Amino acid sequence: MQLIAHRIANKNIAELIISKEIFTTLEDATDLMGDVYYQGFDKLIVYQKNINPSFFDLKTKLAGEILQKFATYKLQLAIVGDFNFDSKSLTDFIYESNKGNLINFKSTLQLALN
């Protein structure tokens, strides 16, 4: 696991580079959040390709639980990827998340950094 540090507008942003799947369990996400927070980051950027597919199956409730943890601890999260899903409920979930400023789904790293 590697965290690439970005500093934009007085915010410390961690970009996660990893070769394994993340967010397989709520505990995995909580551990990652603690690690990022401990290192002084305000925001975390992860890539869709590294996220366990069950995260995007809303029936598992994994996405809701993980994103709620990020919101509770006010650690911003940006997920970078191609979010063309057949699920209307998932598309709506992503749309609603993007209305706020804590959890965002972006198509490029540059958009996530902004």
Image (cartoon, helix red, strand yellow):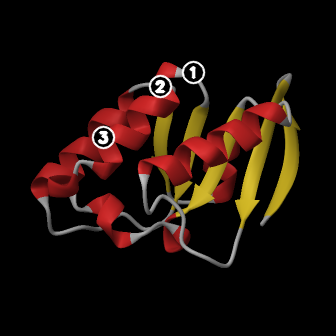
Q: Which of 110 and 66 lies nearest the eye of the viewer? A: 66
Q: Where is residue 71 drawn, in percent x and y?
A: 47, 25
Q: Where is residue 45 drawn, in percent x and y?
A: 65, 50
* Residue drawn at x 34%, y 48% as measured from the top left: 63
Furthest-bottom residue in view?
19
* Residue drawn at x 56%, y 41% as measured from the top left: 30
Secondary structure under badge 2? Answer: helix
Tell me which label, 2 or 3, sits earlier in the chain. Answer: 3
Q: Distance between the residues labelled 2 and 3?
A: 10 Å
Secondary structure under badge 3? Answer: helix
Residue under numbered circle 1: 74
Q: Distance between the residues labelled 3 and 1?
A: 15 Å
Q: Quadrant of residue 13?
A: top right
Q: In this view, does 11 lie above or below 16?
A: above
Q: Is residue 113 above or below residue 10?
A: below
Secondary structure under badge 1? Answer: loop
On-image quarter of the C terminus: top right
Few, some or many C-alpha atoms within 10 Å of disc 2 (few <14, some 14-19, many ≥20)? Answer: some
Residue under numbered circle 2: 71
Q: Which amino acid does label 1 sit on?
A: Lys
Q: Which amino acid does label 3 sit on?
A: Gly
Q: Distance between the residues labelled 2 and 1?
A: 5 Å
Residue under numbered circle 3: 64
Few, some or many C-alpha atoms within 10 Å of disc 1 (few <14, some 14-19, many ≥20)? Answer: some
Q: How many marks?
A: 3
54 with respect to 17 (left or right): left
28 with respect to 66 (left or right): right
100 with respect to 15 (left or right): left
* Residue drawn at x 74%, y 41% as measured from the top left: 36
